Amino acid sequence: MKVAGWLSRLDDAFGEGQFIGPDLLPVVTAETDYGVAAARSYAGFFALSSCIQSLVLQTLATAQRTRLAKSGEGWFRPVLLSFAGLFRILRAAESLFLHGYPLNAYAQLRDLKDRLLATGAVINGYITFQDANGWNTVNVAPELFTIEDFRKRREARKKADRFILDHMTGKQSGLSIETRSELRKWSDFFHTEVHGGRFTFALEGEDWLYGRAPLPIAPSLGSHSKGEGLFISHFEQLGWLLVRTLPYLQPPETHFSSKWHTRWAILDDSLRIVTEERVSAERPLFAAFLELVNQKFAFTPSKTCY
């Protein structure tokens, strides 16, 4: 059957007027309405998020313009590509949130957390960028890889992941026992949602399970406020870690402009204020996160470059 044929068959089975699958329209409308309402209700968060994303984009553009025209930049091109990937995860998570899926957005942040810890380990000099990605294990072109080569690279990445976690948040990190315990909980929270969607089941499904609300399909602002809060707080945490790593993209001989430095400092201070407010509310996870930032992401424009 040709494409036109099976499309016509789908239209006959699911079409109604000008739409295929009109049952989806109320969900799409709810997603749009959620985004409008969320932008109003969480204006402070979206202002902070927009500044984070804007600074990342400015940094990527400046680094690409000032560095890639030169020769001898070594691994800088894949490093810059990895930072573009960090931006895309952050952006994708916010887009999911704006469509009414805060816990699905939260699950996206787990990958961002792992990548940022790896980036921090590289900048701290605990491991090279190549070793963090398992690229030094097999010295043949990718098109010539055998199954055994793929296995070796996979095992090298797993070993690097364990090393990174141990030195960034584990026993070799130098962080206090209390902080390491809280950061394990931080990681476990992500696992709870990523593996099985258990927060989604509990936080978004509880009212339906007890007959207090309709089956949670279309999003509705405020009906899942705990999920919204979980996403926002962790987005801001990881946004701060990303901001802290941006100076790494500076060239050593000529740092970024004074205007960039000023923007970075204002945004960094704003994110610190947000975190310290949560620490003052006696939330131990945020105190642990603050120690992580101060000890493992102590990167500033004046002393950090590639």
Image (tube, rainbow, N blue to C red):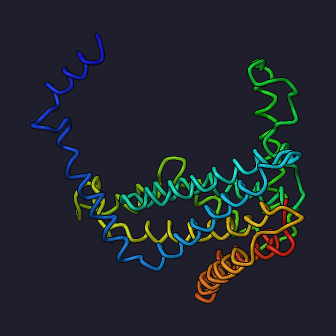
In the rendered image, the residue lying farthest to the front is 69
The quarter of the picture where the C terminus appears is bottom right
Front in this rendered view, residue 9 or 186:
9
Front in this rendered view, residue 230 or 141:
141
The quarter of the picture where the N terminus appears is top left
Decide if residue 97 is on the left or right side of residue 244: left
How many marks the image carries: the answer is: 0
Question: Residue 232's spot in the image, x, y percent?
Answer: 50, 70
Question: Residue 76's spot in the image, x, y percent?
Answer: 80, 49
Decide if residue 170 is on the left or right side of residue 116: right
Q: Residue at x 87, y 69 (%)?
A: 174
In the rendered image, the residue lying farthest to the bottom is 280
Q: Quadrant of residue 189?
A: bottom right
In the rendered image, the residue lying farthest to the top is 1
Front in this rendered view, residue 190 or 255:
255
Decide if residue 287 is on the left or right side of residue 126: left
Question: Residue 243's spot in the image, x, y percent?
Answer: 68, 68
In the rendered image, the residue lying farthest to the left is 17
Front in this rendered view, residue 197 or 131:
131
Q: Residue at x 68, y 78 (%)?
A: 268
Q: Residue at x 64, y 52 (%)?
A: 84
Question: Residue 53's spot in the image, x, y percent?
Answer: 57, 65
